[in-house]
Each structure stands twice: as C-alpha cells, then as structure tokens.
Amino acid sequence: MQGQNEVESLYREYSGDVYRYLLYMCRNPHVAEDLCQSTFLKVISGIRGFRGSCPVKTWIFTIARHEYFHWLRANPATEELREDWKEMAHGGADVAEQYEKREQAARVFSYINALEEPHRSLMTLRLVNELSFREIGTVLQRTENWTRVTFMRDKCRLIRYLEEAENGRPGKEC
C-alpha cells in the first residue's frame, strides 16, 4: 500500500467512519474534522511501515483513537454529548423520525457518556462504527474474547438502565 491512489482510496473508504467515531468521542464537529485530517496525515506518513498484521481499517481506527487521546490530554472534556450528534455525523436525518427517537437516544447517550474507558470506546466502536470484535480488540489492545464478553456485559447493563428509565423500576437481569 504505497501509491497515492491507494491512500486516496483509503481516505474515501474510511474517512466517514473515522469522522463519525471521532465526532462521537470529542463531541465537536470542527475538532472531529481536524482529528480526522490528522489521522489521515499519520496514515500517509506511516503507510510504508504498515505490515499488514491487522486489517487496514483497524490500523486506521487505532491511529484515530491515539489522535483523540492526544487531543484529549491537551483539551480535557467540558462539553456534554449533544443529542444531535448522529444528525451532524450523517449530514441530516428525517426530522419526524429523529423526534420520536430523541428521548430513547438521549438515555443511550447518557449511559455511554458516563462509561469510563475502554468501555466507552468499546460501545462506540461496536454500535456506531460497527467494527468486528476482532477489530475492536486490536484497536483497544485487548483480546477478541475480552471485547465480546465486555460488550455483552455492557450491553446487558445498558438494557437494564433503559428498562429502569422507562418503567421506573429495576430492569430484568440478563
């Protein structure tokens, strides 16, 4: 993977997913755009050293994650997650459909936003970016089994949280 056309192809294929991941993590479209560009600059400078030990998508998301944490160290989080992140990330959405799902989405975002790392990244990479457990394990430097088990546990806790919020009583055990 050394040609300019290949790098352009990688950018076209993965920049949207990387942008959405970074937007979800940093909650600011301008910062997410800057981080996405920074990620692909690192991809360009590091493509010759890419050994192919993991899928290229996983490698790119690992770079994006490192870029986010580098930015986070310099800019501690102060802004709450906006409910309209998905609309921003996807360039618009059906307003009526978004309105119906807003309350449920706010609960999900509230839950995920309260998680500590690496659980927050795990949920984001799986639910928003739809990476495989193997890819997530590589990005988070964990085993595939750890990502599967931890995701299922976090998902179960999320379901209980949503049931509690909806019914006002404890949700069922998974």
Image (cartoon, grey):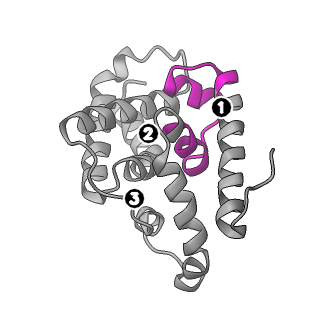
Quadrant for residue 98, please give it: bottom right
Residue at the spot of label 1: 150
Residue at the spot of label 3: 81
> Which comes before the other along the chain, label 3 or label 2?
2
- Estimate the spatial distance between the alpha carbons at disc 3 and disc 1, rounded to whole Å: 23 Å
- Looking at the image, residue 14 sits to the left or right of residue 105; the answer is left
Query: Is residue 126 found inside the magenta-colored segment of the image?
Result: yes
Q: Amino acid at mark 2?
A: Leu
Residue at the spot of label 2: 10
Q: Nearer the viewer, residue 50 or 85?
A: 85
Horizontal and vertical percent for residue 131?
60, 39
Q: Element type at marker 1?
A: helix
Q: Is residue 32 above or below residue 5?
A: below
Prevailing secondary structure of the magenta residues: helix
Asked if marks 3 and 1 touch (Cβ < 8 Å), the reply is: no
Q: Which residues are magenta?
A: 121-146
- The residue most toward the bottom is 96
